[in-house]
Amino acid sequence: SGTAAIITPVNRIGYLGKDIHIPTGEDGMGPVSRPIWTELVAEKILYSHLHDPVHGLGDGGRIRGEAYLQLKPERVAMQDASAQMALLQFMSAGLDRCAVPTSIHCDHLIQASDGAEADLKRSIISNQEVFDFLESAARKFGIEFWRPGSGIIHQIVLENYAAPGMLMLGTDSHTPNAGGLGMLAIGVGGADAVDAMTGTPWELKAPQIVGVHLTGSLSGWTTTKDLILHLAGKLTVRGGTGRIIEYFGPGVHSQSCTGLATIANMGAEVGATTSTFPYTSNMRGYLHATGRGPVAKAADEAAGKGFLSADDGAEYDEVIEINLSDLEPTINGPFTPDLATPLSKFGAFVKEQGWKDELSAGLIGSCTNSSYEDMTRVADLARQAKAAGLTTKVPFLCTPGSEQIRATMERDNVTSTLQDVGAVVLANACGPCIGQWKREDKKGEENAILTSFNRNFKSRNDGNRYTMNFLASPTVVTAMAFSGSLSFNPMTDSLTLDSGNRFKFSPPSGQDLPSTGFTPGDTSFYPLPTPEPQPDAEVVIQKDSQRLELLEPFTSPFNDGNLELPPLKVLMRVRGKCTTDHISAAGPWLKYKGHLTNISENLLITAVNDEGGDVNVAFDHDAPSGITETGTIPGVAKRLKGRNQPWALVVDENYGEGSAREHAALQPRFYGCNLIVARSFARIHETNLKKQGVLPLWFADKTDYSRIGSGDMIETVGLANLLQGHPDAIIKLRIKWLHAGSALNHIRSQMK
Ligand code: SF4
C-alpha cells in the first residue's frame, strides 16, 4: 500500500552519520556504521531503498555520479503500449507472480477522433486482442488492471498510488509526474520494470542532484507549466541527464500538489532521471482529497522526523535560482521542448521566422496538465469568453487525465462550460499527445498547433511533419484558441467582438481541489486492489496474431567461446537529433508494440543518414547485384540479418533521448545490431541497449564520428580483457548480460 512507502527509521541508513541500528529482522541486518554526511530528499529516498542496506553504499567514497546503486523499487506501473513487451519478457522469466505491486493502464491505444464515447468504443474494438492479452496476464500474475477509459497512467498513479518517500518505476518516460507527491518515480524500459517485477535488484548510477531554489510567487497568467518551460529553455534537453532535479525554497510550498506534478512530469524533457520536492502541506491536502488520509498521517510523522526534507547543509551539485515573481508565461517549440520564448516576445518571434500568424488547433489536458486546478482555470476563461459572445476560432480539444477528473469536471459544470465555447472533450486517455489523433485537416501542410502537453518532436501529435507544435500552459492555449492567431498575447491584447467592442481576458483563477471533494465517476473502471494471482488463468495470445508475438531469445554474439564481437558492418552514420521516436516511431506503429517482427519495420524511418542527408535511406554495399544499392533503413538492416552479417551504427549526440521506449533497443538488436558507437547516449536508452545485449560505446574523441561510414567494418580489440577483468560488480553483471545475449537470457539462466 501507499502507507508502506513512507520512509521509516527502520529502513533508513546513514542518517546524519550516526550509527544506525537496523533491527535484526527477516533480512538479518545488524548495526551499521556510516560516515558522517547530510542528505538531500532524493538521497534519503534512494538510500532507504537499497537492495542491500548494509553493503549497498560501498566504502563511503564519492557516490553521486560514480557509484552504481542496487535498488528495491516498491511499485511498477505500465502503460498499455509498453506493458505488452514488458509482460512478454516477464512471462519468459517463468515466475507465477510479481515481486512488487504492479499496475497496467490502458491509455495509449485510444484514438481521438469524434469524442469520448465513440472513440473509446471504436478503440476498444480495434485493440481488443491487446486489451484481452493485458487483462489475462494481469489476472494470471496478480496485477491491477485499469481498463481503457479509466485514465492516463500518471494521473491515476498520482491519485491512487503515489506517496511521499516512495520509489517506483514506470514503463513510460513521464513517470516522474508522481514526484509531485514528494517521491522518486523513474521512467524505465520494460526490461528494467521486469527487474523489479522479478525481485532482481534494479540498478541506477547514483545521480547528481541539481537544486532549483524557488523564491517569490506565481501570479496572474503564470503557472507551474511556465516554470518548467522556462527551466527547459535554460537546461536544454540534455541538461538533466544523469541528474535528479530537487526543488526547494519557499516557492515550493505555495504550489498545489498537481502543479508540482506538472513540473516533475516535464523534468523528462530536460533528460532528468526524475524530479522531487520536500513534503508540503498541499501534498497533505491532496492525499486527503484523494481518500488517502492514512498515507498523509504517515507522511506527517516521517516529515516530523526530518525524513521528507533535505538536511541543513546538504549540498547540491548545482543550484539554479528562480524567482517565481519574475517569470512570465512561456511558449516552447516548435519541434523541441527547450526552445523557450516568453509570451511577450512570441509574436515577434513568429514574424521573424516568417511563419503564418495562424493557429490551427488548441489542445489541453494530457497527463501533464489535466488537474482540477488546470481545468477550473481554463473554465474561468471560457466563462469570460462566453459572456462576451465568443467561441473558439479553431478546433479546441480537451483530454481529461482520469475518470475521477472527468466526472468531477462534469459534476462541477466545467465540462459544459468548455463545450459551450466549442470544446470537444475526448476520452480519458493519451489521444493526440501520443499521435493517436485522427486529424482530417492540414494533412502535409505547414500549420501551427498549441498544446498543454509535454513533448513536441516532429510528427508527434498528428503524424504531419509540417505541423509546428508549441507547448504552453492550458490557460495560454485556451485564450489563444479564441484569437486563432499566434501573435495574440492575452495578457495585453484584446479581441474584437461582433458588436465592434473590444474584449480582454482577466487573468484566470481556479481552485486547487474541488470544494465538495472528487467524485469517482464510473467505478467499473477501477481494478480490485492488490488482486491475487490466478496461476491457472490462460494468457490470451491469438494464433497468427499480427499484434502479439512470443519472444524468441536473442543469440549471444559470444558463442563458441569468442570474447571479441564478430566483425561488424556499419549500417549507417545517423546525423543529429535521434530520439526514440526516430528509432521506433509511435502513431500507427503503436499497434505493433507486442509484435517485434512487425514493429521492426519502422526502424529509424525518420532518422537522417549523414552520408547524403536523406531521411530513411541506407546503402547496401554487398548487394547480390555487385553494386551498392539504396534502400530504406529497415530494408537494408533486414538484408544484413538475412546474410547473418552482424552490424553496428554510428550515432551523434544524446542518441536515444526522449522516452523509455525499449523497442528502440530491441529492434536494432532483432535485426542483428551488436554495437552502437555514439558521441553520447541518453541515460534510459543506454541502459536499454545493454539490457538487450547491444554494446554502447562512446567516441573518446567526438570528431572521430565522421571518420566511420556505412559499409566500413568494425572489429573490437581488447574487449576480451575489459570483459574478463572488470572489478566492479555492476559492470560485471552487465558483462554477463552481454555474454548471455540479453539481460533476460541471464535472468532466465539464474532461475534454473
Ligand atoms: Fe500519455 Fe502524453 Fe502523458 Fe505520455 S505524455 S503518458 S502519451 S498523455
Image (tube, rainbow, N blue to C red):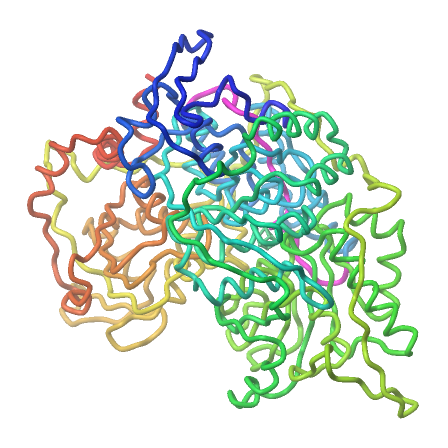
Residue 471, percent from left and from top = 59, 68
Q: How many marks?
A: 0
Toward which corner of the image does residue 679 lie, by quadrant? bottom left
Q: Is residue 107 magenta?
A: yes
Q: Which of these two is toward me, 671 or 362? A: 362
Magenta-highlighted stretch: main secondary structure?
A: loop
Quadrant where the N terminus sits is top right
Residue positioned most to the bottom: 500
* Residue at the image position 46 percent from the left and 26 percent from the top: 48
* Residue 392 position by quadrant: bottom right
Q: Please indicate whether residue 184 sits to the left or right of residue 746 in the image.
A: right
Q: Up-down: is 726 above or below 321?
A: above
Image point (63%, 54%), residue name:
368
Decide whether residue 609 is among the magenta residues: no
Residue 260, above or below 197: below
Name the quadrant containing residue 432.
bottom right
Side of 701 where 222 appears, left or right: right
Percent across and percent down for residue 197 are 48, 27
Tell me if 483 is positioned left or right of 89 in this view. Answer: right
Which of the pair 65/331 is nearer the observer?
Answer: 65
The structure residue drawn at horizontal position 42% and vertical position 54%, both measured from the top left corner, is 240
Front one among 132 and 517: 517
Q: Is residue 420 above or below residue 693?
A: below
Q: Residue at x 44, y 7 (%)?
A: 24
Q: Which residues are magenta?
A: 93-115
Q: Position of residue 219 (x, y in %)?
A: 71, 64
Q: Residue furthest front?
A: 313
Residue 478 rendering spot, x and y as whole percentages: 74, 70
State left or right for residue 714 relative to residue 553: left
